[in-house]
Amino acid sequence: MNSLNGRVAIVTGSSRGIGRAIALELALRGAGLVINYHSNAAAAQEVVREIESLGAQALAVQADVRTAEGAEALVRAALEAFGQIDILVSNAGIVRDTLLLRMSPDDWHAVIETNLTGAFHCAKAVQRTMLKQRSGRIIHISSVSGLVGNAGQANYSAAKAGLIGLTKALARELGSRNITVNAVAPGYIATDMTASLTAERVEAARKQTALGRLGEPEDVARAVAFLASDDAAYITGHVLVVDGGLAM
Ligand code: NAP
């Protein structure tokens, strides 16, 4: 097990789904956790309790990553509680799936603001601390939709592809200060986000996946924990696909 003892991590959107699994995985490896949520306070508190039961420290912080103020408040709360930030996982995300014909400007902006601009605000808010520390790990949760595109997801695919560009630009910008910036691109993972898909669509996704099953949030969480660990010290600007062989 890669030890993250003494490290502090912020995971955006960690009240549920993949973010929750990432937070638990990092806590299991010894990190202190800041659990961020948008509206679901009870779920975030439950994640804090689960982490405390593992013997690690955690704090739930409400913040809307769509705004610079939200991201700054999140980072301030983390620094007040822990005095350092070693790992930022920008995971918060939403979908507003529909064909371009029916996609409203609001559908477009909502997804870009949360999934892409949110990661920009968080990286910007955390960079001063990481630059001073001369170390850090930034991990963006992208998607295979950002690599190969997905019909009905023009907004989401654009945001997730944008995250890959952001990852590579920041990897170049921050590398000399020992800050690595990577992306993880999951395939179909069983969470609230995919729960609304029709049985036919889930079956089609399963059939396209070489391993013959949808992913679990923990499949993504273990990849993130690796990128956050010392074992990944010489990996930056990378997109790690965690899709069971869907998009190859
Ligand atoms: P989910 O179960 O719907 O959870 C979304 C999380 O994001 C929740 O914790 C939610 O907080 C938070 N959130 C939403 N808007 C926010 C905002 N403005 N500010 C702060 N937090 C916000 O989603 P998921 O399936 O775990 O997905 C997590 C990430 O993985 C997303 O970036 C998603 O695009 C990506 N991904 C998912 C899949 C998949 O198949 N599930 C595949 C590829 C990539 P509240 O609980 O307070 O609402």
Image (cartoon, grey):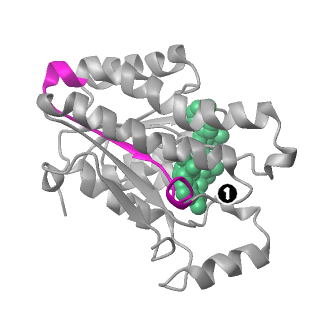
Q: Is residue 212 depicted above or below 29 in this figure?
A: below
Residue 94 drawn at (x, y percent):
65, 44
Secondary structure category for the residue under label 1: helix
Specify whether tag 1 is near ligand 1 (CB below 8 Å).
yes
Tell me which corner region of the image, top left, top right, bottom left or bottom right, holds residue 155.
top right
Residue that appears at 68% across and 48% down: 154
Q: In the displayed structure, does residue 20 sit left or right of residue 241?
A: right
Residue that appears at 30% across and 32% down: 170
In front of the other: 120 or 32: 120
Residue that appears at 34% across and 62% down: 222
Q: Is residue 144 magenta?
A: yes
In front of the other: 110 or 199: 110
Q: Is residue 43 visible?
A: no
Residue 23 drawn at (x, y percent):
41, 48
Tell me which corner region of the image, top left, top right, bottom left or bottom right, holds residue 131.
top left
Q: In the displayed structure, does residue 242 sit left or right of residue 178?
A: right
Q: In the displayed structure, does residue 153 sit left or right of residue 157?
A: right
Q: Is residue 183 visible?
A: yes
Identify residue for label 1: 192
Q: Residue furthest top?
A: 69
Residue 122 drawn at (x, y percent):
43, 27
Residue that appears at 45% across and 27% down: 120
Quarter that holds the C terminus: bottom left
Q: Is residue 103 magenta?
A: no
Amino acid type of the residue that numbered disc 1 sits on in the rendered structure: Asp
Q: In the displayed structure, does residue 25 sit left or right of residue 162?
A: left
Within 10 Å of disc 1 (Cα), the crowding (few <14, some 14-19, many 20+) is: few
Quarter that holds the N terminus: bottom left
Residue range in magenta is 130-148
